[in-house]
Image (cartoon, rainbow, N blue to C red):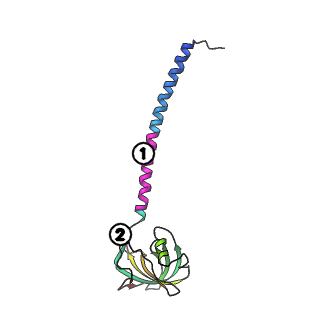
Amino acid sequence: MALDISEFEAVGLISRCHWHLMDLSVEGITMNAKSLIVLSAIAGLLLAAVPVLAHHSFAAEFDSNQPMTVTGVVTKVEWMNPHTHFYIDVKDESGKVVNWDVETGSPNALSRRGWTRNSLKVGDTIVVDAFRAKDGSTLASARNVKLSDGRKIFAGSADDGSPDSKSGPTGSTKY
């Protein structure tokens, strides 16, 4: 069965459908575009905040009035930005083994001071001059590390705001 409509009616019907669909599309695109812009802005702000949260000043986290020296066995090395970390097992005064997280400068800064990825190996016994975290946790910021081969290498970052790091901490506490 054929539909009998005049050419004029067909053009008018198509025209009305076209504008109706255009109105929905424009509103839909506009709403989607607004949502996309808002979500992109939120994601951008969150991503921009990550480096700020991840990086900190020495004074924000470590106490320059709590220098310490620890001797321990390397259990793990994380050679990555923004700071290299290594972990050492240290015996406390009661003989209990405590694992310390020791933060150093960036891999690039360490490389300029003679460090390599292989300077510290799991199982090495080392001596670390460091500053303890303000929160009293087993986190420390290393100044100097005496490696198992006897070399003493500066481990801090020259621009981190810590006390004079060339000579290492003085009056340090032994753990």
Given the image, on which type of amino acid does mark 1 rest?
Val
Whether residue 89 is visible here, answered yes or no, is: yes
Identify the main secondary structure in magenta: helix
Q: Quadrant of residue 122?
A: bottom right
Determine the residue located farthest toward the front in the rendered image.
112
**Local SS, label 2:** helix
Residue interval drawn in magenta: 33-52
Give above or below for 22 relative to 156. above
Q: CA distance from mark 1 to mark 2?
A: 33 Å
Determine the residue located farthest toward the right in the rendered image.
1
The percent position of residue 141, horizontal first and vertical second, equals 41, 76
- Residue drawn where x is 44% and y is 56% of the image: 47
Residue that label 1 marks = 38
Nearer-the-camera pick, 117 or 23:
117
- Residue drawn where x is 43% and y is 40% of the image: 34
**Local SS, label 1:** helix
Residue 48 on the magenta span: yes
Instruction: State which quarter of the image contains the N terminus.
Output: top right
Residue 39 on the magenta span: yes
Q: Is residue 126 left or right of residue 161?
A: right
Which numbered disc, 1 or 2, marks the residue that appears first in the sequence?
A: 1
Q: Residues within 10 Å of mark 2 (few under 14, many from 20)?
A: few
- Tag of residue 60: 2
- Residue drawn where x is 39% and y is 78% of the image: 131
Given the image, on which type of amino acid does mark 2 rest?
Ala
Q: Is residue 165 left or right of residue 110?
A: left
The percent position of residue 150, horizontal first and vertical second, equals 50, 87
- Tag of residue 56: none
